[in-house]
Amino acid sequence: DIQMTQSPSSLSASVGDRVTITCRASQSIDTYLNWYQQKPGKVPKLLIYAASNLQTGVPARFSGSGSGTDFTLTISGLQPEDFGTYYCQQTYSTWTFGQGTKVEIK
Amino acid sequence: QVHLQQWGAGLLKPSETLSLTCAVSGGSFSGHYWNWIRQSPGKGLEWIGDINDSGMTNYNASLKSRVTISVDTSKNQFSLKLKSVTAADTAVYYCVGPMYDSSGSYSGDTWGQGTLVSVSS
């Protein structure tokens, strides 16, 4: 199985901050990488698919980059509604997810 | 736009069999893999397995001995069975499948609404 390692596991940032979450795959996954946001009790919400494509309806402050083994989710200008847990997911082979990054607003 | 609607029993006793079904609407069922994911309380996301319209399956090795995923192409539905459940199988279970845009390019995955399955004696 392909292992996905996210960092950090949690962070606290202020409104307006630039936030970066990284995800590393144990082997190359090309750009078969999605990013999700999940709020408590809710279904995970797709933010970015295929590493860098913004899902329809997702604010442009979210962006994704990377290919191969190293990927980044960036929130440019954190907003109060951006709290939650963020997961990366590889779909290159049988799916695996990162362990999650909990984002809190200071 | 692809929509997934899932259903199944939410309360089980240990040793019983979990059974969930997911109906796919608004998109092509054929030619794609359809997935089951679960999330234990307070935990991360775990892939259970997938199936395509031909019935080819892949399973998470840690669950393989207890899992069966099946498909009914006449109804555009796929199902999950997990036998011999224990409290450790208590989780929200999701069905998940791919979306494609008007040009046929992959545009991410869509999720069912989730079903909380609790296992308790």
Image (cartoon, coloured by chain):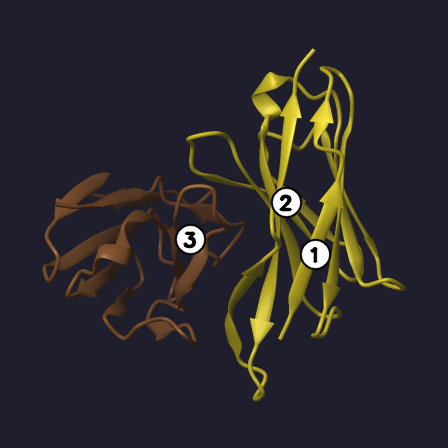
Chain colours: A brown, B yellow
Q: Is B13 drawn above or below residue A85 in the view shown?
A: above
Rendered residue at 74%/20% (across/down) = B84
User: Circle 2 is placed at which residue position?
Assistant: B49
Q: Nearer the viewer, residue A39 or B97?
A: A39
Of all chains, the one bearing label 3 is: A
| N-terminal-most mark, 2 or 1 | 1
Q: Are marks 2 and 3 in contact (CB under 8 Å)?
A: no
Rendered residue at 46%/46% (across/down) = A96
Three-letter code for the amino acid on which mark 1 is drawn: Gln
Do marks 3 and 1 share a subunit? Answer: no
Of all chains, the one bearing label 2 is: B
On the picture, is B36 further left or further right than A104?
right
Q: Residues within 10 Å of mark 1 (few under 14, many from 20)?
A: some
On the picture, is B83 further left or further right than A44?
right
Q: Position of residue A36 (x, y in %)?
A: 39, 56
Rendered residue at 26%/69% (across/down) = A63
- Report the disc number at residue B5: 1
- In front of the other: label 2 or label 1? 1
On the picture, is A97 further left or further right than A102?
right
Q: Position of residue B68 (x, y in %)?
A: 76, 38
Q: Secondary structure at mark 3?
A: strand
- Report the disc number at residue A89: 3
Three-letter code for the amino acid on which mark 3 is drawn: Gln
Q: Nearer the viewer, residue B14 or A41?
A: A41
